[in-house]
Image: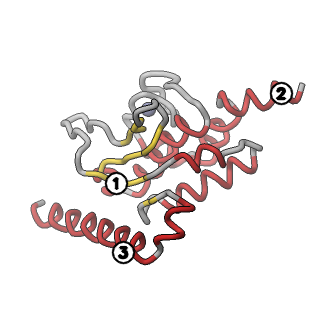
Amino acid sequence: MKRLLFLFGAFILTFTVMSQNAEFELPEYDKVEGLKTDGVIQPFLDDFLKLCEQYNIDYHDKLFKLKEIVLVDTLQVSPNGGTLGMLVRGKNNDVEKIIFSWMTLLDKEILKVVAFHEFGHYFLEYKHICDDCNKIMAKVNSSYFDIAQDWDYHVKNLFINSPEYLKQQQKKK
Ligand SMILES: [Zn+2]
């Protein structure tokens, strides 16, 4: 287990170093873009934004306001799993960061579900829809694997039942 922890530590270190390099090499791009995203989360963000387009949900303003989408080792870990992801607000109460616990790296499926959950809070204006009901927006997920197994179904429901999507539908009427 110690060796595993060391490996994860090395992982995180690599990501940190990589993102710093990117910042250093592309100062102008960074200023315009203003968003730092960890490489492991990027594919899930890309997928999520593609789906936003598919469901006609405008994400550009919100994406522009974000500063970081990153893995951290500061989220509380408890025997029950603890907090795996969180939106971090700045002084004016705007969301500035979306952070994920390094624990999500233990399994790609966990990271995927947690990423879509946090993006659901931010881009789709979701609050939790239940305590533990095997849905992406549940407060607690006892089984990420049930959701991951039926992924397309859960993602479709996440979008068509979202406050942001329903708001769009209302406007059309
Ligand atoms: Zn949540």
Q: Quadrant of residue 153?
A: top right
Q: Nearer the viewer, mark 1 or mark 3?
A: 3
Pick the residue in front: 59 or 40: 59
Element assignment for label 2: helix
Relative to 56, say whether 21 is above or below.
below
Q: What amino acid is at disc 2?
A: Lys
Q: Is residue 56 left or right of residue 151?
A: right
Q: What amino acid is at disc 3?
A: Asn
Residue under the point 31% across and 48% down: 101
Going from N to C along the chain, the mark reached first, 2 or 3, is 3
Cα–Cα span, label 1 and label 2? 36 Å
Residue position marked by numbered label 1 in the rendering: 71
Residue position marked by numbered label 2 in the rendering: 171
Residue position marked by numbered label 3 in the rendering: 21
- Ligand 1 within 8 Å, label 2 CB: no
Q: What amino acid is at disc 1?
A: Leu
- Ligand 1, by image quadrant, is top left
Pick the residue in front: 65 or 156: 65
Cα–Cα span, label 2 and label 3? 44 Å
Q: Quadrant of residue 89?
A: top left
Q: Quadrant of residue 58?
A: top right
What number of labels is visible?
Answer: 3
Residue under the point 12% across and 60% down: 1
| Residue found at the far bottom of this picture | 25
Kindly identify which numbered label has been placed on residue 99: none
Element assignment for label 3: helix
Q: Is residue 173 left or right of residue 87?
A: right
Q: Nearer the viewer, mark 2 or mark 3?
A: 3
